[in-house]
Amino acid sequence: MVQQLLTLARMTVATGVEATTAAEETTRLFGLDMQLIHDTLIMAVNVFLIFFILSYLVFNPARKMLSGRREKVEADLQAAEQDKKDADALKKEYEARIEKADEEAEDILSKARSKALKNEADIIAEAKEEAARLMERADTEIERERRKAIEGMKQEIIDIAGAMASKAVGEKMDVEIQEQLLNETLKEMGEDTWQN
């Protein structure tokens, strides 16, 4: 029975403590007690320590990585801008080279045309010279053939004159006398008379 009494006393004390704590809680506006303030301060220190550790272990490397990426992107943008400027300069240089090549091609064509005209003039001049040589050679050949024909005619005239003279004289004359007589006759008649 003592035990029952003890149990009952304990319950009464527990009920009394609960009643006093319930009464105290209703009298406090926010329910702030020292334990809550103590727990809040420890939690705040813990959160601060977590942020400090995270800042050291996670945030700073992340910031460094982000700043490195930012610098890399800026460097890439500057390199791209420089490449664009270089490409524009190369484009202008190539356009200038193409223009120069066009001018050189036109110059080469102009020189080729003038050379072709000069060659044409040279060929025409050579052809004229060749034609003049052929004409001169033909004139020389004609003159030679004319002289041959004259000599042939002279010989025929000599033969005819010799035949006529031998009939007229009745005797045969020798060749030297015939030529002498023919030459004398021709001189008396003149060369123009019998050549035409």
Image (cartoon, rainbow, N blue to C red):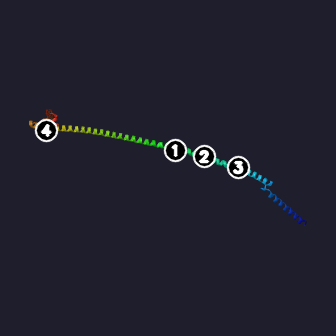
- The label number, if any, that marks residue 55 in the structure image: 3
Q: Which residue is mark 4?
A: 160
Q: CA distance from mark 3 to mark 2?
A: 26 Å
Q: Residues within 10 Å of mark 3 (few under 14, many from 20)?
A: some
Query: Which residue type carries mark 2?
Result: Glu
Give the numbered dot on residue 74. 2
Residue in the picture at 58% in, 46% down? 77
What is the quadrant of residue 134 in the picture?
top left
**Mark 3: which amino acid?**
Ser
Mark sitting earlier along the chain (1/4): 1
Q: Nearer the viewer, residue 83 or 39?
A: 39
Which one is closest to the eye, mark 4 or mark 3? 3
**Percent x, y of residue 28:** 79, 56
Residue type at mark 4? Ile
**Looking at the image, do the residues carrying marks 3 and 2 touch, with CB atoms under 8 Å apart?**
no
Percent coordinates x, y for residue 175 in the rendering: 15, 35
